[in-house]
Image: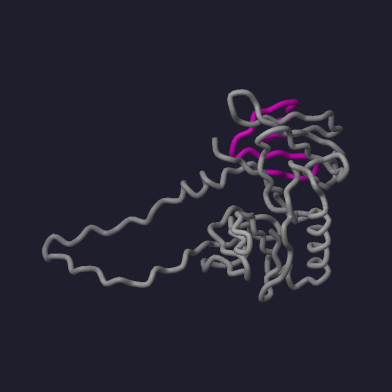
């Protein structure tokens, strides 16, 4: 089974890259940095709100941990629920989405090639430089994948309220990471950028196998990022 990821949808406090659902153990989600594995803050989010873990036969399931306002999966309040890509989870005022980056990539249709003309033999095609891969950002137009010093972006994973998330390779250690780039309109807000950095540094100090690891935070040519 391919890996599934969980991302926070919205703007308030959305600073972390997507979290991979656990291959073993469980991922506890809540607002307490001391008790939760994945910290999600917002109105109505309990200290320990719900947990996600592997189930027999493969896949993942969610269990509400007695939260006051409950856990909503795809519009229905649940005690337990099996999860799949595309599911939306509501914890108080915060929405999370389950997604499969591999399936998203496979779903993109390959460009079709025109059939050669039957009237005249086709001439050998002249070799052209391979164009750089392009993506489309919600806060921009079609264009090149982002260029951040020290990273090579591979493909777009998804959009968040604060920016776009890309699957990338950190060149110095040759490891795959989720690279989040802040939207340009937010990058011009110096107060917001400082909060973005502080929350990333705080997350980097946490050490737990089910917590999303933050490796780096910085700025390159006006683009603020974390990985």
- 131 lies left or right of 57: left
Residue extending furthest toward the front: 173
Which portion, as a residue range, is magenta? 72-97
* Residue 90 drawn in magenta: yes
- 222 lies left or right of 191: left
- 148 lies left or right of 185: left
Image position, residue 200 (x, y; %): 78, 58
Q: Quadrant of the N terminus?
A: top right
Residue in front for this viewpoint, 194 or 90? 194
Q: How many marks?
A: 0
Reply above or below: 93 against 79.
below
- 213 lies left or right of 135: right
Quadrant of res 211 = top right
Residue extending furthest toward the top: 56
Residue extending furthest toward the bottom: 221
Q: Quadrant of the C terminus?
A: bottom right
Reply above or below: 58 against 122.
above
Quadrant of res 94 = top right
Image position, residue 121 (x, y; %): 13, 65
* Residue 74 drawn in magenta: yes
Reply above or below: 58 against 161.
above
Image position, residue 187 (x, y; %): 73, 70
At 70% from the left and 31% from the top, the residue drawn is 53
Residue in front for this viewpoint, 68 or 225? 225
Image position, residue 127 (x, y; %): 30, 71
């Amino acid at each position: 089974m391919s890996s599934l990821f969980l991302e926070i949808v919205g703007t308030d406090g959305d600073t972390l890259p997507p979290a991979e659902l656990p291959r073993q153990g469980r991922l506890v989600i809540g607002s307490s940095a001391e008790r939760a594995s994945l910290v999600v803050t917002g109105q109505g989010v309990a200290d320990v709100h719900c947990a996600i873990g592997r189930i027999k036969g493969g896949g993942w399931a969610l269990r509400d941990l007695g939260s006051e306002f409950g856990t909503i999966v795809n519009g229905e309040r649940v005690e337990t629920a099996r999860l799949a890509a595309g599911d939306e989870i509501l914890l108080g005022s915060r929405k999370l989405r389950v997604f499969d980056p591999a399936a998203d990539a496979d779903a993109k249709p390959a460009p079709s090639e025109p059939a050669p003309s039957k009237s005249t033999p086709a001439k050998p095609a002249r070799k052209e430089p391979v164009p750089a891969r392009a993506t489309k950002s919600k806060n921009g137009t079609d264009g090149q994948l982002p260029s951040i010093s020290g990273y090579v972006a591979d493909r777009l994973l998804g959009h968040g309220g604060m920016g776009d998330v890309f699957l990338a390779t950190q060149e110095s250690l040759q490891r795959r990471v989720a690279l989040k780039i802040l939207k340009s309109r937010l990058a011009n807000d110096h107060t917001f950028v400082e909060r973005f950095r502080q929350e990333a540094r705080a997350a980097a100090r946490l050490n737990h196998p089910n917590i999303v690891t933050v490796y780096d935070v910085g700025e390159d040519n006006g683009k603020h990022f974390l990985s």
